[in-house]
Image (cartoon, rainbow, N blue to C red):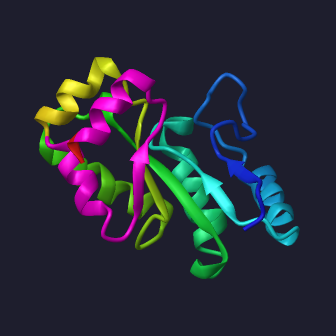
Amino acid sequence: MKKLGFGLMRLPQTNPEDWSSVDMDKTKAMIDRYMEEGFTYFDTAYVYHGGNSEKAFGELVAKRYPRDSFTITTKMPVFMVKSAEDYERIFDEQLARCQVDYFDYYFLHAMGRSVYGAVQEQKGFEFMARKKQRERSGTSVFPTMTMRICWTVS
């Protein structure tokens, strides 16, 4: 794998006042050039562009390129999870948005001290352990002190 990723957090917009308004034509041209150059790694998240980042990935990558030609990472928005059931619901929604059967990498997004207790109580770490069967899982934005606690749990 070439060592450059395509981040879908700041895509071109059709309306600069509306963060969710992804310019699909410009994004398609960028993605096609990226793939033509032999790059394959994409990074998105549930909240990027109001959910339209994952949808853009699904339409412009997953729908148009063979599954074995790209690698996709997305993230669980732990700050939006209110119950244990939300993990599975959001995960399934992300699969549908991205138009894939699995994610190559899957992270708990914006994990930190302020949400750690809720993630533990809602069985978020157990959810991630189950997803390790197929997806490579982990966390993003994780302070070092909290990380030490987490690794002793797993």
Q: Residue at x 83, y 59 (%)?
A: 29
| Residue 33 relative to residue 61: left or right | right
- In magenta segment, residue 135: yes
Q: Is residue 115 left or right of residue 50?
A: left
Residue 106 occupies quadrant: bottom left
Q: Vertical placement of 69 versus 146: above or below?
A: below
Residue 48 lies, in percent from the top left, at: 54, 38
Q: Position of residue 115 (x, y in %)?
A: 28, 24
Seen from this angle, which residue lies furthest top? 114
Is 93 colored magenta in this rendering? no
Q: Nearer the viewer, residue 80 or 3?
A: 3
Using the rendered view, name the quadrant where residue 34 is placed.
bottom right
Decide: is 148 above or below 60: above
Give the x, y percent position of residue 21: 63, 38
Instruction: Answer with left or right where residue 85 lies relative to residue 26.
Output: left
Q: Nearer the viewer, residue 96 or 85?
A: 85
Residue drawn 36% across the image and 71% down it: 134
- Range of residues picked out in magenta: 123-152
Is residue 54 shown above or below 79? below
Give the x, y percent position of residue 153.
Answer: 21, 41
Q: Residue sitting at 22 percent across and 34 percent down?
A: 119
